[in-house]
């Protein structure tokens, strides 16, 4: 078998390069999906929509970096799907074989799919050849506020790219909990997942009505700080040393009235005269100011 015909097989508990022996003892080739009528194709296609994600409690992960990040933290995956041509490409062997071996070690099913079908499922213009389905966390996760609690609540933030950037920033800052109220973009959409650069796998995501979060914060003695460019305490004069939940709202309208009335307003000065800051930038400024206060 020439190097151009390289194929990986499941052999002795791992996906390995086929050396040319076709006996059954060498392992079995990964199943190839060739039809849009295949149930797995339909499942992957379904979770590209909000409705499909809610129905199946699964979301799409695209690209080797994100799949690898999910493996790193043992995030629960339903399955992995690889474009067939990647099994015959030297350029992909560097990342593909390690991911296949990790999937085997975790007993996660892996499937091959013809290129045309794979491109139908991929959400990027230049697909990198690998998709996975990740599982939603358990419903009704208990809210807790341990010592030093720091969280972010997004109230009406609509832009998926901003939400993904906020996830990435929260992950970098060591935040564990993100809160989402109705009217906020779906945190499990493909654009959010990709923009998070893997941050979504390191965070607990809570989706509930605003009133439920505000009531919990009050009972847990967590101070709610509501981002408001038009008034409130200057952010570097506010005391974020105690348990804190930052509430950030719609990119232009800000948080809803109930949110503004449910916490302490905090502002980031805009001496240049801009109307507002990008919500993801605001999240980073507030989180790192809280970290600065807690480490100094």
Image (cartoon, helix red, strand yellow):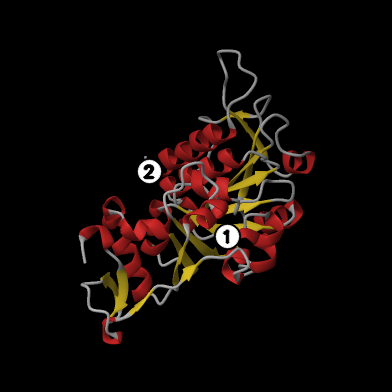
| Left or right: where 207 falls relative to 64 | right
Whether residue 177 is visible here, answered yes or no, is no
Whether residue 169 is visible here, answered yes or no, is yes
Q: Nearer the viewer, residue 47 or 183?
A: 47
Residues under labels 1 and 2: Cα distance? 36 Å
Mark closer to the chain start, 1 or 2: 1
| Left or right: where 294 falls relative to 227 | left
Image point (69%, 36%), residue name: 250
| Quarter assignment of residue 231 | top right
Residue labelled with disc 2: 295
248 w.r.t. 1: above or below: above
Q: Which quadrant would the C terminus be assigned to in this image?
A: top left
Where is residue 179 shown, x and y percent of the image? 62, 52
Residue 59, which numbered label?
1
Q: Which quadrant would the N terminus be assigned to in this image?
A: bottom left
Mark 2: secondary structure? helix
Image point (52%, 53%), residue name: 116
């Amino acid at each position: 078998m020439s190097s151009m015909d390289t194929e990986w097989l499941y052999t002795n508990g791992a996906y390995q390069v086929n050396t040319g022996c076709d006996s059954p003892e060498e392992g079995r080739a990964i199943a190839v999906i060739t039809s849009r009528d295949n149930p797995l194709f339909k499942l992957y296609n379904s979770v590209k929509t909000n409705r499909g994600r809610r129905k199946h409690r699964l979301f799409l992960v695209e690209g080797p970096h994100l799949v690898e990040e999910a493996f790193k933290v043992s995030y629960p995956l339903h399955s992995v799907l690889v474009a067939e041509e990647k099994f015959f490409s030297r350029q992909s062997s560097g990342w593909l074989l390690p991911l296949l071996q990790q999937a085997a070690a975790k007993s996660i099913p892996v499937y091959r799919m013809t290129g045309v079908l794979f491109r139908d499922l991929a959400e990027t213009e230049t697909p990198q050849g690998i998709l996975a389905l990740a599982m939603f966390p358990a419903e009704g996760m208990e809210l807790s506020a341990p010592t030093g609690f720091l969280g972010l609540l997004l109230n009406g933030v609509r832009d998926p790219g901003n939400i993904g950037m906020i996830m990435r920033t929260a992950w970098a800052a060591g935040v564990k909990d993100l809160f989402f109220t109705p009217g906020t973009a779906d945190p499990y959409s493909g654009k959010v997942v990709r923009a998070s650069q893997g941050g979504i796998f390191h965070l607990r995501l809570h989706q509930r009505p605003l009133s439920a979060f505000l009531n919990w914060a009050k009972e847990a003695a967590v101070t709610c700080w509501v981002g408001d460019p038009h008034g409130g305490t200057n952010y570097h004069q506010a005391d974020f040393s105690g348990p804190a939940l930052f509430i950030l709202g719609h990119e232009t309208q800000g948080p809803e009235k109930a949110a503004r009335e449910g916490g302490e307003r905090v502002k980031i000065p805009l001496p240049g005269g801009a109307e507002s800051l990008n919500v993801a930038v605001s999240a980073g400024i507030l989180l790192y100011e809280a970290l600065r206060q807690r480490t100094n």
